[in-house]
Image: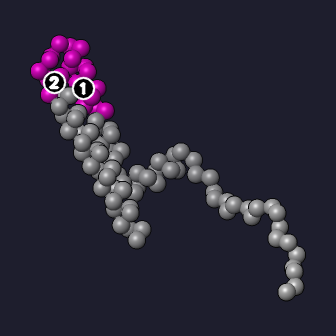
Amino acid sequence: MAAGPPPPLEPSPFPTFPEEGFADKFLRKTRENPLVPLGCLCTVSVLVYGIICFKKGNTRRSQLMMRARVIAQGCTFAALLGGMAATAFKSR
């Protein structure tokens, strides 16, 4: 059996990918699943309006807005899970 030269000791170079900035990644992810940013915006708006109502002393409206915030958070979470499932099934 002939012995060949020993394998190189230096590791093979890793593949390089173009850098993707925050704005590019945000736009790409928004295009993939547009309901998540929309749900986040809705959740924050309901939260801010609920806090404003609380400061003004309108406790009934404030409680209603906090309940609406929980529903909006749930819908956002469902959209996030749905988008992840759709992406997983699409890659198969």
Seen from the viewer's position, the closer of residues 79 and 11 is: 11
Residue 73: x %, y % from top left: 26, 39
> Local crowd at mark 1 within 10 Å, few (<14), some, or many (≥20)?
some
Seen from the viewer's position, the closer of residues 91 and 34 is: 91
- Looking at the image, residue 20 lies above or below residue 16: above
The residue segment tinted magenta is: 44-64
In the current view of this chain or complex, which residue is farthest to the left? 60
From the viewer's perspective, tell me whether residue 2 is left or right of residue 72. Answer: right
Q: Which quadrant would residue 14 be assigned to in this image?
A: bottom right
Q: Which residue is mark 2?
A: 63
Q: Which residue is mark 1?
A: 49
Q: Secondary structure at mark 1?
A: helix
Residue 28: x %, y % from top left: 46, 54
Residue at the (36%, 67%) spot, across then down: 89
Q: Quadrant of the C terminus?
A: bottom left
Q: Nearer the viewer, mark 2 or mark 1?
A: 2
